[in-house]
Every structure is written in structure tokens, then in C-alpha cells.
Image (cartoon, grey):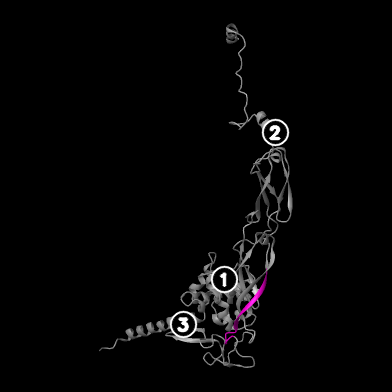
């Protein structure tokens, strides 16, 4: 077979060279920095914070999102690893004041970014996303170590607490007994018997991370042998069997805030963990609730409705005297400003709306009946009839004068 000429061989070498460069670029971007396409999304948008966010807000936003998109908790999500890496790059840039200033000046990829800004910004993550997360995780968990990662991803247990209407409206301190997995009291969560030591994990060399060869790429993930602890338990705790946790029954005093509504949930610390408590509020036989406002009915007599007076209504905090104007009608609404429920996460109170209901007597004394008959005979605006009352028929108006008088009226 005839060998290709010099030009063909040169072209073949050039093609191979650029092919190697492309594969090297993909490999590097996978581990150490995101590709240029990632810069199209603003770092502030990646973390979901405003451009005026403080360092505390930036760190908190990164921590929450990194937990959500951590590859270990999203094994079936192919985009989770990329999102996790983007979060690391965004945090690394915005958590450094100098890099953040440079990024704000040259690196905005928003609609207002110019080509010159894109040209001068040379970002890219220089830290392993896993190492960054381990560092921030340790800060948020008080230095418990990366071995607690699995327990951190566990869903906090949820419980239901029953409340009366008044307890929810006025607030109360109420106890609840729960069974939860908490730190083992024997080994203090370490997982090994007191007085014993743990062995250095040689599988990951104590780093808690292992490297996996997947063809042209190297991936890093939590060590499968030590579960990210970096050490191996030789003598497991006899109480928790090496898990560091035991099932414990605890009684918790829950401070129920005034104004809590049915279905709302609060987070309550229990030992070194926390639980979620959802409130179920019972109906009130007196009050109806609408946010911070309450509604109730008050019964008044016929005499009160006609002549006026005062009525007593049950309030949230005390009995209330209500002025009844003469001639009030049923379902008339009276507003008692500021007599409602405290506004949760706000200031002030709602209102109490009282609806007038006229109570019609079913049994009358002879005197009451006679008085009502007398009143009914004088009542002029009755449509129809009243049982037991006969009104005299209206007499037709008499026309005065005879024929000549009528004729005279026609011409006058």
C-alpha cells in the first residue's frame, strides 16, 4: 500500500493533536472548572441570592442547595453532579471578596453584561466540589465530621399535636412524647465502644472519598467502605451496634405560638436533632376563624331588637358588652377592632365580628300574648295577615255632592 504523502501525514498529525486537546479540556473541566457555557448563568442566580447578599446569606444558600443536589442523594439524577459543581464554583467566587468584586465588574453574565465584561472575566472553580461541601458541612454541623452526612440527609421525623381552638388562638406550652433516633448515650454517637479506637481506612486513605475510574474520566464519591468517615470501627458499640444512634423516648415541651393555624408545622429541637410538629386545631362551638379575624353570633330578644339596649358576647379574652341600637335587624354585623387573634410573624391583632341573631320566643304568657295582639292591631306595614288578628276593612271614600257638583268639578 502506498504511504500518504507529506501533506496528508501532516494533516493527520494536526487532527490527532486537536483531538487530544479536546479530550483533555473535557477531562479538566469535569473536575476543576465548569465550561464556558456555565458562565452564561449568573452566579447570584445559581445560589438564588440578590447581588447585595451578605457572606452569611451566600454561605447559607450554598449549604441548602448543595444538600439538595448532592450526588449521593440524587443517584438517578444525571444533572445533579453538574448542578453541584456549579454551586461550588459560584460559592468559591462570591465567598471571596476580591473574586466577587472582579466578578461584579467583569463577570456578570446577565442581560446587561457586555462582551468586554465576558472577555476579561476568567473564572472557574479551583476547589473540588466535594471538599468544599465537606468544609461547609463541618461548619454548619459544629465539626461533627463528614461521617454524619447520611444522617443529615435523613428526613426529620414528623408528629401531630392536637390543639383546642383557644390554645391555638392564645398560644400555649404543651408537652408531647416522641420516639426518635437520637445520639447514642453510650458512645456519644461515635459508634464504637468507649475506650476503644477506630482504624484508619486504607481504602480511601482516611479522606472519606474514593476515586472511581469510569473509562476516560475519574469520579470521586463517598467511600463505600467507611461511609465517608475516613476510619473503620473495629469494636462497635453494644448499644447502637455501630450506628451511633438509638431509639429514644423523649418528652418535649413545645411552645405553641399564639395565632397558629390548622395544618401549620414548626421545627422543634430534640436533643442533638430536631423534629417537625404539625398542628391540628379543633373547631370551636362559638367562634369561626378567618386568618387573624374571628366571627361569632350573639342572641338578643325581640324587645332588645326593637327598643335597643346592650348584649353580652363571649370574646377570646373576656366577656364583651355590645351596644344594641333600636330597630336593629337580624344578621347585622358589628366590628370589634383589635379583639381577634394575634397575627403570626407580624404585629397587631385581627378583628372580632359579631352577628346579631334575634331570638323569637316559642312560649308566651297570657299578658304577653294580649300585648302582642294589641300591637299587631295597630301595626300598619304588615303584608298579609296575622293569626288571631282581625283588622277592620278599609271604608271606600265617599264622594261629596250629586250630579251637578260632579259636573261643576269637571269645568273647574
Give coordinates of residue 69: x percent, y percent. Answer: 52, 74
Between tags 1 and 2, which lies in front?
A: 2
Mark 2 or mark 3: which comes first in sequence? 3
Q: How many neighbours does mark 1 have within 10 angstroms: few (below 14), some (14-19), or many (20 or more)? A: many
Q: Is residue 212 left or right of residue 371?
A: left
Q: Nearer the viewer, mark 2 or mark 3?
A: 2
Residue that badge 3 annotates: 27
Q: Could you say which quadrant of the image residue 243 lies in?
A: bottom right
**Where residue 47 is drawn, which disc sits there?**
1
Residue 101 in view (yes/no) = no
SS for dot 1: helix
Quadrant where the image shows the N terminus: bottom left
The answer to whether marks 3 and 1 mark residues whose Cβ atoms lie closer than 8 Å is no
Which percent across, then down, holds residue 81?
Answer: 49, 77
- The quadrant in which the C terminus is found is top right
Quick check: marks 1 and 2 in contact, CB under 8 Å?
A: no
Q: Residues within 10 Å of mark 3 (few under 14, many from 20)?
A: some
Q: What is the chief secondary structure element of the magenta stretch?
A: strand
Q: Residue furthest left?
A: 1
Give the foreground label among 3 and 1.
1
Quadrant of res 264: bottom right
Amino acid at each position: 500500500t502506498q504511504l500518504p504523502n507529506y501533506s496528508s501525514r501532516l494533516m493527520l498529525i494536526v487532527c490527532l493533536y486537536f483531538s487530544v486537546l479536546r479530550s483533555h479540556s473535557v477531562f479538566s473541566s469535569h473536575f476543576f472548572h465548569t465550561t464556558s457555557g456555565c458562565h452564561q448563568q449568573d452566579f447570584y442566580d445559581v445560589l438564588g441570592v440578590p447581588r447585595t447578599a451578605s457572606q452569611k446569606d451566600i454561605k447559607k444558600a450554598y449549604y441548602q442547595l448543595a444538600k439538595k443536589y448532592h450526588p449521593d442523594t440524587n443517584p438517578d439524577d444525571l444533572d445533579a453532579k453538574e448542578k453541584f459543581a456549579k454551586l461550588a464554583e459560584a460559592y468559591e467566587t462570591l465567598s471571596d471578596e476580591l473574586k466577587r468584586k472582579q466578578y461584579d465588574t467583569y463577570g456578570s453574565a446577565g442581560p446587561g453584561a457586555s462582551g468586554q465584561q465576558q472577555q476579561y472575566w476568567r473564572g472557574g472553580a479551583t476547589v473540588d466540589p466535594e471538599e468544599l461541601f465537606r468544609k461547609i458541612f463541618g461548619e454548619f454541623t459544629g465539626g461533627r465530621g463528614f461521617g454524619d452526612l447520611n444522617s443529615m440527609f435523613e428526613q426529620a421525623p414528623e408528629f401531630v399535636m392536637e390543639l383546642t381552638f383557644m390554645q391555638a388562638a392564645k398560644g400555649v406550652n404543651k408537652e408531647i412524647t416522641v420516639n426518635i433516633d437520637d445520639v447514642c448515650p453510650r458512645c456519644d454517637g461515635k459508634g464504637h465502644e468507649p475506650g476503644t479506637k477506630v482504624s484508619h481506612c486504607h481504602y480511601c486513605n482516611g479522606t472519606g472519598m474514593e476515586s472511581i475510574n469510569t473509562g476516560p474520566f475519574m469520579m470521586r464519591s463517598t467511600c463505600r467502605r467507611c461511609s465517608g468517615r475516613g476510619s473503620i470501627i473495629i469494636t462497635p458499640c453494644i448499644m447502637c451496634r455501630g450506628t451511633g444512634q438509638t431509639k429514644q423516648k423523649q418528652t418535649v415541651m413545645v411552645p405553641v405560638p399564639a395565632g397558629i393555624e390548622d395544618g401549620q408545622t414548626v421545627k422543634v429541637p430534640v436533643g442533638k436533632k430536631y423534629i417537625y410538629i404539625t398542628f391540628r386545631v379543633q373547631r370551636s362551638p362559638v367562634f369561626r376563624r378567618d386568618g387573624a379575624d374571628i366571627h361569632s353570633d350573639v342572641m338578643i330578644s325581640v324587645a332588645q331588637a326593637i327598643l335597643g339596649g346592650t348584649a353580652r358576647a363571649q370574646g377570646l379574652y373576656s366577656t364583651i358588652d355590645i351596644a344594641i341600637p333600636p330597630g336593629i335587624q337580624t344578621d347585622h354585623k358589628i366590628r370589634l377592632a383589635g379583639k381577634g387573634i394575634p397575627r403570626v410573624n407580624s404585629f397587631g391583632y385581627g378583628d372580632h365580628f359579631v352577628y346579631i341573631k334575634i331570638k323569637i320566643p316559642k312560649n308566651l304568657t297570657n299578658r304577653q300574648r294580649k300585648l302582642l295582639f294589641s300591637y299587631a292591631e295597630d301595626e300598619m306595614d304588615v303584608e298579609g295577615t296575622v293569626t288571631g288578628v282581625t283588622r277592620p276593612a278599609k271604608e271606600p271614600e265617599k264622594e261629596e255632592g250629586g250630579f251637578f257638583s260632579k259636573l261643576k268639578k269637571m269645568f273647574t
